[in-house]
Image (cartoon, helix red, strand yellow):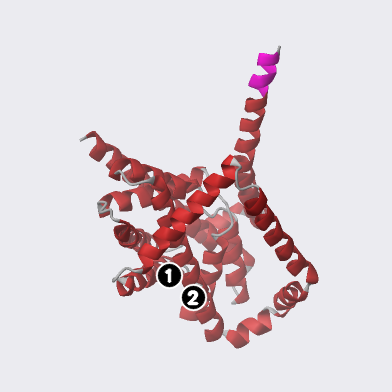
Amino acid sequence: MDNNIEETIPQKKSLVKTILQIILPLGLGILIVYFFVKDIDPKELWSILKNANWGILLFSLIFGLLGNTIRGYRWELLIRPLGYSPKVSNLCFAIYGGYAVNFALPRAGEIWRCGIVAKDEKIPFTKLFGTMILDRVLDTLTVLLITVVAFFLNMQFLMKQSEESLGSISRLITSPYLYIGILVSVLIIFVVFKYMGENFIVKKVKDLLVGMWNDMKDIWKMKTKGRLIFYSLAIWTSYFFYFYITFFAFGFTENLGFIAALVAFALSSISMGVPSNGGLGPWQLAVIASLTLYGVNNVEATAFATGVFAIQSLWVILCGLFGITAMAIRNRK
């Protein structure tokens, strides 16, 4: 009887974990997409997509692959100061595969790529995980820079269009609850690390953080910081053209201009921070909202977001499968 109960508990935990990691993000993404397409005639949507210039859409995919490849070179630059010299091709393959894994399980791709490289290149997982965290920090800083540039290039227009949103942000910043929440969070973290230091999980987390901090100091001493900055800018320049070129595939976006594309790109990049299956839902929401700011009607904006997301997602998955297969074949040899 007790054995049956013990077997049931792990099964329930596994089911809850599956719901939280897979079903919930996927369901949320589908719900967001449904919200935008529920009042749109599918025939009208298909007519817009059918008349798009698919040659331009296919051409834009080159820049997505280019950005992910440069990311592999940047990752190698972050790993090298730690005393390891992995094959750049393996790092690129792992990055391609990681983005494909994110479609099945949000945020799992980053863990997967660290794990597969750790196994193939004989590098400790914790060290790779630290470089992956730094990789994401560099991305965040670059996206913030892009957002600031986009805002200042079109400040007057965006201020006029976003008065209500800016008011909400202002209320949030001046709210005492925000600072109370931050203070409580800091106190909880302090108490856990101060008085529960002997706990197995806390010790593991502390060891991980100390190891990552030491690795960060080694990386900071690298003599190739200029190349690191160049790679970071090159990655996001490639991603921008990956997105911007698609504007020329549709008649209603081809004349919106560089700044409108930069604003839409900045908002869509920020939306990728929301855990979802490859951006499903939040990405479309950000793109549709951006395009409607510039006078594109809801149907056309939805068609654009749907078509671009579909072809880019298929491309990411195909590149990911190629990367996973290439690594498997290389390991077999």
The quadrant of the rendering that contains the N terminus is top right
Label 2 SS: helix
The quadrant of the rendering that contains the C terminus is top left
**Residue lying farthest to the top in this orientation:** 1
- Quote the CA–CA distance across marks 2 and 1: 10 Å
User: Disc 2 designates what residue?
Assistant: 146
List x then y, in percent, for residue 164. 74, 77
The kind of secondary structure the magenta stretch mainly shows is helix
Residue 238 in the image: above or below residue 129: below
Depth check: give the residue in front, 251 or 3: 3
The amino acid type found where label 2 is placed reads Ile
Point 61% across, 31% down: residue: 14
Depth check: give the residue in front, 310 or 253: 310
Residue 9 in the image: above or below residue 20: above
Residue 212 in the image: above or below residue 225: above
User: Disc 1 designates what residue?
Assistant: 240
Point 52% across, 77% down: residue: 260
- Tell me the magenta residue range: 2-8
Label 1 SS: helix
Residue 85 in the image: above or below residue 243: above
The reply to whether dot 2 and dot 1 touch (C-beta < 8 Å) is: yes
Looking at the rendering, which quadrant does residue 284 occupy?
A: bottom right
Point 49% across, 76% down: residue: 145
| Horizontal side of residue 56 vs 137, given as left or right | left
